[in-house]
Amino acid sequence: MLPQSLFGGKRLPRLPQLLLASSLTLAGALFPNTVQAFTLNLLHFSDGESSLLTRTVSATATTPAFNYSGAGLFADLIDRQRNASSTDFDLLVTAGDNFLAGPQFEASLRLPVGQMFYDARALELFNIDVGGIGNHEFDFGPDVLARFIDPSGSGVGFRPFVSANLIIPDDSPLKGLIQPSAIVTKTVNGVEERVGVVGVTTPLLRTISSPGNIGAIGDASNTPGFANLVNTVQAEVDRLTAQGVDKIVLVSHLQNINEEKALAGRLQNVDIIVAAGSDTRLANPDDLLLPLSGETAVPSYPLIYNSQTGQQVSSLADLPAGVAPLLIVSTDGEYKYLGNLQVEFENGIITSILEPGSGPKRNTNLDGLTPRADLVSEVQNPVAAFVNDLRQTVVGITNVPLDSLRTEVRAKSTLAGSLIADAIRDAARDGAASVGLDPANILVGIQNGGGIRNDRRFLPGDSISEFDTFDILPFSNFVTVVTGITAGELLEILERSVASQTAPDVGGGGQFLQLSGLEVVYDVTRAAQVVTVDGVITNPGSRILSILLDPENDRAGQFLFDIAQGGFLVDPSQPLFDLATIDFTARGGDNFATLTNMSQDRKFILPGVTYQAALERYIREDLQGTIDAADIPSGAGIRVRDVSALVAPATGGQSIVDAEAIPEPTTLLGLAIAGLGLGYARRRQVKK
């Protein structure tokens, strides 16, 4: 049997072992001490997420003012680490989430077709070798990602992008633009050296983004489907090793570094995994971190594993003789850090980690970095100008007081929260047909209070700019429709919404829901719903006293649930309507266990429709730029209220849901809407 150390701990098929044995015996006699040494300078980053502009932190008693993040400083940091290294081979890779919805990426979306996105231009000017694919690349659908990779539409990307487990149909615009792997070839000391880079994307892609007809092989590590992901990656690795590539890096965007850890011991012939999607800040005690609140390190950089057993070890010296290590590296995103791993290979196996060069390198002018001029002129300046224009672009005027105060939107029904929920429902109806749904079925909209931010106040007469809508709704949350909601499911969702209330209109957490199309009464003195961290409801709660389905917010809907009338007034298991929300909530964010446990085939993310865009379009188009009290009926203190609130009871005089017959949901809701004259066209009123 051949010793593994001769082939870097890599497995060879039995026949090649036998054929090579005699050759190696002769080679060993002629060159008894030959060692093929090679040093790699791996530079890596991920989750840049369109953080192209430099951020400034004011001085404190212990820290001077400083700048950090941004593409210009990052380019200088890359150059510094390339120039400082004495290694043979520089390799710069990203591991996905190269852009993200927000005002900075909006600058790219509004460029003429054929012009390179600013995020792509930054990667090009960084001179990356290979790019990975994360989940946020699909937030706006495959067409936008294709435009990102191939702005000219020539069929050739500006750099190789890799993911081995994506299933890309022949008719997709991404066909040919994303490959399973790439081989980076550079000449070192007159010798052509090759490093293979394989990609893998989270198999949860369909549930957290909008990939269209693109699939992802595999599943999470705690499921049997994880083996499919492992086998798919291994097959691509084997294809590279069959070509003689004996140094392989996996750029992995699996959202949780524990997923990458689970690959240790299950993948053979992979030397380094760049883990992404979790913003895990791996570092050692001597690595400098940014002086920001909460900026702590996760020991250590790199993580070292026995490639055969998957066991973590403290150092390379702890590995058995002849066993190849598997190293895992990861850094924080948003261009805050550049990871730098410098390693030495001998005969294809990592034999040493070079210090002090290895570790995360912070991106800040505190270390003497200065923004590189080309990134400033070609990326940062136009993006900054665009963001400034957003501040100057008026979306509408409000004639009612609006605010995004944390203590308000997380505790009670507010005008701003109700307006946002109405906008989300409107956007869901507008986009329903694009995902094969009937807009007339979407009767309810919800928005979690935790997604409304930055404590903004707008007084009557104030203008609302486009930037204000990004400021109030800053996350990359996409409008999502959850189909076939039952009264039983709705009650559980609403019990979770008010579970953190400590008094009427006081103490709600981020899960408190702003509503559209519903009116809910609760009693804070009754038992709250209890949910474990694993999403198991151990106490259903009994705070909800009544639920009025009220599609026009006119207080003339139908009671679905009312304690005074004995509880459910419809079959609690009967599908009643489709629910508009954001993908964060639809996935069970804020520990909405009921939504977590729903099957994924009931959830439809609208590609490219963020909740910010929903609000902007609703104000600009539906309300024609003027927000009046009549546009937010029952918005303040009524849609959600404690029983002690002095508000007249709802009329509840119309029959929206037939509580007797239980036809298919589409038939049920179609008849209900027709009977009420609440047709889709009614929402498009012309303001006078």
Image: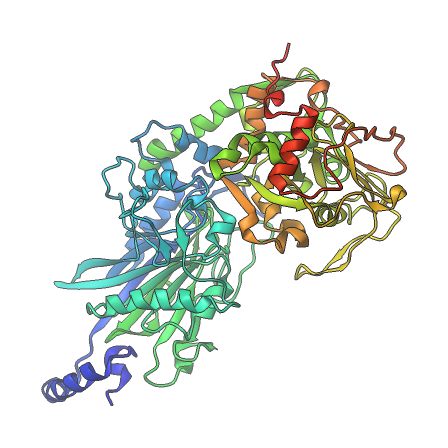
Residue 555 on image: x %, y %: 78, 28
Left-right relation of 494 to 431: right
Q: Quadrant of residue 670?
A: top right
Left-right relation of 285 to 472: left
Residue 57 on image: x %, y %: 55, 40
Q: Quadrant of residue 327?
A: bottom left
Q: Quadrant of residue 521?
A: top right
Q: Residue at x 56, y 41 (%)?
A: 480
Front residue of this view, candidates 252 and 63: 252
Residue 536 on image: x %, y %: 70, 61
Task: Indicate whether 517 appears above or below 352.
Answer: above
Quadrant of image for the C terminus = top right
Does residue 211 appear anywhere in the picture? yes
Q: Residue at x 53, y 24 (%)?
A: 391
Q: Residue at x 38, y 85 (%)?
A: 320
Quadrant of image for the N terminus = bottom left
Task: Indicate whether 398 appears above or below 71.
Answer: above
Front residue of this view, candidates 655 and 159: 655
Residue 425 on image: x %, y %: 61, 33
Q: Residue at x 57, y 32 (%)?
A: 439
Front residue of this view, candidates 131 and 222: 222
Front residue of this view, candidates 43 and 533: 533
Left-right relation of 648 to 621: right
Extreme residue toward the top, this view? 688
